[in-house]
Image (cartoon, grey):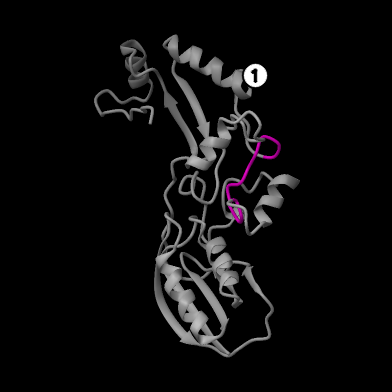
Amino acid sequence: MKAILLHLGGRVQGVGFRPFVYRLAHEYKLCGWIRNLSGEVAIFLQGPEEDIQSFTRALVERAPPLAKPEILSMAPAAPASLEGFSIRESQEQQGNVHVPPDQFTCEDCLRELTDPRDRRYRYPFINCTQCGPRYTLIQKLPYDRPHTTMAGFPLCSDCQREYQDPMDRRFHAQPLACPTCGPRLSYGGLEGHEALAACIRDLRAGKVVAVKGVGGFHLMCDARNDAAIAHLRKQKPRPHKPLAVMLPP
């Protein structure tokens, strides 16, 4: 029986890294825990030396697509009386901070978004461990829900079940939400798809719309309407600097 303590840096928060490590440890039947630090993670492992070596190789080679882990240190540790592997409460400390960027909606979430049978059908704030907002909603590290702008949205029973299920892709997804418990789309007294349709009508009519997202506000108008663009530039005021343009994927 061998025990080691790993410290990892790089892009390891907000990218589904802890759930990945949890599943990997169970795959190799190792005991221990993982914990978020400020911008880093600590992993305690114990088990047969050969399995620990296989685990550490897979830790980098099989990391989630959004993760870029770097092993900062690996030291022998005293074996502990542990059963299984767990995700422990985060700790704040000094460290190299890497705030993960926002990520474009993944294919799995897009499938759910357009599936009338799915409970997140047309839900604009859909996300999972591999996509969705990160940078725009993080208030401080370590990256946990209470440290984000989602702290004011307690999870419903269905979302809580996903959050706690190691085999679910939303296992420990901090921005997790659904139409029952998460933010809702609203516009001019309307909600949901009706709100979106009304907003589109106003944009096509040449109006400037203020859009509040999980990270703040932005002003939006029809990029094909010269009068609307001129009005937006006057409101900003931003007479010459280029404006951001949104295009379909």
Q: Nearer the viewer, residue 248 or 210?
A: 248
x and y, in percent, of residue 139 in the image: 52, 52
Q: Which residue is mark 1?
A: 189
The quadrant holding residue 67 is: bottom left
In this orientation, does residue 187 appear?
A: no
In reply to whether residue 172 is colored magenta, the answer given is yes
Q: Residue at x 43, y 53 (%)?
A: 100
Q: Main secondary structure of the magenta part?
A: loop
- Residue occupying the far top of the picture: 205
Q: Nearer the viewer, residue 141 or 27?
A: 27
Q: Residue at x 49, y 75 (%)?
A: 55
x and y, in percent, of residue 56 in the image: 45, 75
Name the quadrant of the N terminus. Answer: bottom right
Is 70 on the left-hand or right-hand side of 215? left
Q: Secondary structure at mark 1?
A: loop
As drawn, 203 above or below 137: above
x and y, in percent, of residue 124 in the image: 56, 32
The quadrant holding residue 196 is: top right
Is 194 on the left-hand or right-hand side of 93? right
In reply to whether residue 178 is colored magenta, the answer given is yes
